[in-house]
Image (cartoon, helix red, strand yellow):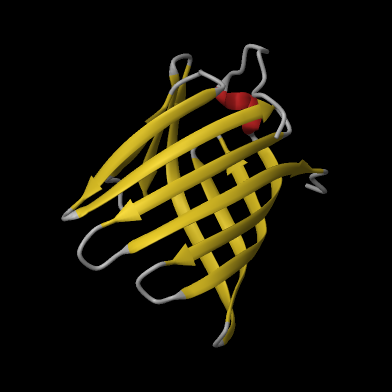
Amino acid sequence: MAPPTHEPLQPADFVGLWQVRRRLVDHLGHETLGFAGQARIETASITETGEVHSSRGTLEAKRLYLLEMDAAGVDVRFAGGAHFVHLGLAPDQRVLHHCGDDLYEGRFIFRSRDCWIEFWRVSGPRKRYASLTRYERIPDPA
């Protein structure tokens, strides 16, 4: 994998349309899932739409996060407004999120304005999985 960018990045640099590919390994369910779709990032939200593929079939999927961008980074919130994580401006950063008894450990590697990698390791009494997602900018027809 190429090293992260050393260019100065600003949150608004990521506004646009993105191709999303995700692989999730569910250690409790002994299953690997895939997601393929798109993400639209706007200054106040990110919406992912696509399909989840598993051994049981394919399902349509959609998720929404609210964003609050400023010169220091981005606060990411769940659709209901609860805080999820804060991303600063560093090209390689780690984040933590506690959700009840579950711990989400994330790493974001911003390779350029057109590509980033997101890794999560989730552990708790009802969840134990790892996911790797790649976002690549695509032309926006809008």
Q: What quarter of the picture does the N terminus occupy?
A: top right
Q: Is residue 7 visible?
A: yes
From this view, report whether residue 8 is shown above or below residue 109.
above
Provide residue 23's location: percent of width, then percent of height.
58, 60
Extreme residue toward the bottom, this view: 56
**Against 92, is 18 above or below?**
below
Foreground pick, 41 / 58:
58
Q: What residue is at 60 percent from the left and 62 percent from the top?
A: 49
Which residue occupies the foreground of this view, 98 or 129?
129
Q: Residue at x 72, y 29 (%)?
A: 2
Residue 98 located left or right of residue 57:
left
Q: Quadrant of residue 66?
A: top left
Q: Does 94 appear above or below 9? A: below
Q: Which of the 4 image quadrants contains residue 106? A: top left
Q: Position of residue 40 (x, y in %)?
A: 63, 48
The one nearer the camera, 113 or 54, is: 54
Residue at the far left: name it. Answer: 101
Q: Quadrant of residue 100?
A: bottom left
- Residue 132: x, y in percent? 55, 51
Image position of 84 with respect to 26: above or below: above
